[in-house]
Image: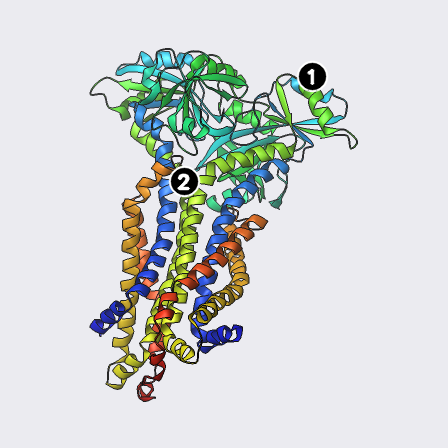
Amino acid sequence: MFRLAWRQLLIDPLRTCLTAFALRAVIATILVLEGFEQGQYFQLARAVFDRDADLIVTQAGVSNFLATRSSIPQLSRADVESVEGVVNAHPITVLPVIYEKLGRKTPLFLFVYDTRGGAVNIIEGQNISDGRDIIVDVSLAKRYDIQIGDKFIVSDFEFKVAGITEDAAALFTGFAFINYDGMIDLFLESEIAPDLSTFPLLSFMLVELEPTADRVKVASEIEARAPDVDVYTPQQLAENDVNLGRTLFGPVMNLLVNVAYIIGLLVVGLIMFANVRSRLRSFAVLKALGFSNTNLAFAVLLQALLLLIISLPLGVLLAQGIAMIIHLYTPLYLIYMFEPDVFIHTLSASIIFAIIGSWIPLRSIRKADPMLAFQGT
Amino acid sequence: MFRWAWKSLLTQKTGVFGSAAGVASAFILVIFFDAVFRGESTQIITYIEHTRPNIWVMQRGVSNMHMASSFLWDWKADKIATLPGVKQVTPILYLNSVVNIGDQKALSYVVGLEPGSARAGPWEMEAGRSLPKPGEAIIPAVMATLADIGIGDTVSITDKSFKVVGLSKDTYSMANSITFVTFKDLEDILSSTGTYSYLLVDTDEGVDANELSTRIMNDVEKINAMPHEEFIKSDYRMSMQMGLEIIFLMTVICSALATLIVGFTAYSQVMNKRRELAIAKALGMRNMSIVNSVIFQSVAITSLGFLMAVIFALTIIPRISTLVPQVSLLVSPSAFIQIGLVALVVAIVGSLIPAYYVSRLDPTSAFHV
């Protein structure tokens, strides 16, 4: 039966190729959509992990890193650093700002850092050495054709692009990095805030611990000593942000992925239906030779599974190619497919499509009259 | 030859319908993506749209509300209120933050309202009061439903808890729902005093908003004043821009998928009818006529798919928000025009391989037994 299914595929290589292409495209579309959703979550988690902290201190009651306002009293830093096991509490401030150039506006997260928490993957230029320096994510650089040394104006304040970094984006928003000299100049010169106390001068603290320090113990000690703050491990904070992301993107991405699954089902069904219709005479011959409807249905199912086996690895490769192209041209979006869940979903959905798809032409097989085999062409 | 092509399509109704449905699904995916971004962008500006003052005043260098921060001294509001042509100035305090609601979290515009400031508050209520008192909040009804809470329950912003006293309508969006609290409570959260975020300026009747905006900017230093229409456009454009690239990419991916489906169907049609086509060639039918008929079949299948996608988009997509209330979808006629043009390209490209096959078909194959 396996041989029969295999030979059916070899009868018309062009049709088999087209079929495999269509299946590949369906698998790739599903993977890209699933990967797009996972990419959002991956970016959210990476935004936390890239800050390189053992513990992260937030304003009391704030349990997220991005898209929320956290403002910690400056004096808390001394309290945190006085806890045994803490080597340093590196300050970091996150400000949402709007970048505008030539009539186009883009929101961005401005990360202000001192000794830790800056850009981690600088691909061009160098790190910040001056208060006027700024490092921007490649997504912004590409969108606005920004080169090293260019002006980068935020709220009338002129920064100079010192470096371009990659993988610094989340929530459809690119990141830019400046130091605290830059932030103070930005606030004062551009009068971004008439009342400086209104703006969070210190959003988070990135706590660096001694190698032997007990994280849980240090965290509770910090919370006891500084009541204005909460302490999280990067894993906890990343998980909170990912959960927020799931609330944001989950419903809509589920709808889109379901539409992609319906396409998959239709395509497999269509392919198997067209295959059976075009080989109705062959099926009639097989029936005349004594093959039962069940045997023939099994052959069709095997054929669908064979097509799937051929298409699956190529579909993954195609999806990876699409993901690379998307990331190359619009690095703001990350298609992250290397999640076991994504592969398991796609694989099981594809197998279900193959099974359901091979049921669709069953009626035609049942109706194939063995007499057809003996009719003239 | 077109008649033959048409009749040949009609003989395989199920196959044609199946391929058209596949093509339609690919187009629906694109329309859906567009509707998501358009719906969300529309919902993002819903506060601006409904409060609708004549002029918005904010900090200099700021010209948006979405993902923006703005702070200006309170005396500037007093000064603007005395300018000729200004009927009323309503200040709000504003924060973009996470609201903890039950065991869920939601991104929200938190709007701080002065006592009795219904002008800047919710415009339609599902239940409860529309103006909060200290320690109280008005949240979107959809948000309450999703988190399974109601009036009397508690939400929190940073470490401050609020009792829910009202559920507002039409204030929910995935990216930015609107939560109303008192001005004083939001001041506490922001640790600010004597500052406003935005001023909603209503003008006297017959006053030109553009002229008054310019006058406000000339008379009050370091602020930005924008007529309502300009401000709303600015926010809408920015939020749509955030999705433009991904919509374009999805259009390319789904169009490629649709092209393959059309190509496969057209090829299957040709293969099933190759003997008839060979006879037509043997009878003297020119290659161009046969190729045109293949293209006609592709166009017919794609058009049917496009039509199915449009019908789906117009009838089903608007109802999805009832089933999934957290998703705001807005179907746009411009998306149909774009997809229509893409469909034409898909039909032509999809017919290339079968057309090539037909052009090389040997007429003598008609006489093989």
Q: Secondary structure at mark 1?
A: helix
Could you say where residue B318 lies in the image, as x and y percent from the top left? 31, 41
Q: Are marks 2 and 1 on the same chain?
A: yes
Taking A213 as reference, is A89 left or right?
left
Relative to the observer, which residue lies in front, A299 or B183? A299
Residue matched to label 1 = A225
Count of residue discs = 2
Decide which of tag 2 and tag 1 comes sooner along the chain: 2
Contact (Cβ within 8 Å) of mark 2 with mark 1: no
Name the kind of residue labelled 1 in the image: Arg
Q: Which mark is residue B361?
A: none
| Residue A327 against residue A249 in the figure, above or below | below
Q: Position of residue A272 (x, y in %)?
A: 41, 66
The residue that appears at 55% across and 34% down in the rendered structure is A241
Answer with the quarter of the image where residue B63 lies.
top left
Q: Amino acid at mark 2?
A: Leu
**Location of residue B233 by image quarter:** top left
**Distance of label 2 from label 1 (alpha carbons):** 49 Å
Q: Position of residue B134 (x, y in %)?
A: 44, 11
Residue toward you, B104 or A305:
A305
Q: Is residue A144 visible?
A: yes
Q: In what element is the residue under mark 2?
A: loop
Q: Which chain is disc 1 placed on?
A: A
- Label 2 Cα neighbours within 10 Å, binned few <14 / some 14-19 / many ≥20: few
Of circles 2 and 1, which is in front? 1
Crowding around mark 1 (Cα neighbors within 10 Å: few <14, some 14 to 19, many 20+) is some
Q: Chain of mark 2?
A: A
Q: Quadrant of residue A278?
A: bottom left
- Please say whether residue A339 is visible from this viewpoint: no
Q: For residue A102, which numbered disc appears in the image?
A: 2
Q: Quadrant of the C terminus of chain A?
A: bottom left
Residue B76 in picture, x, y percent from top left: 39, 14
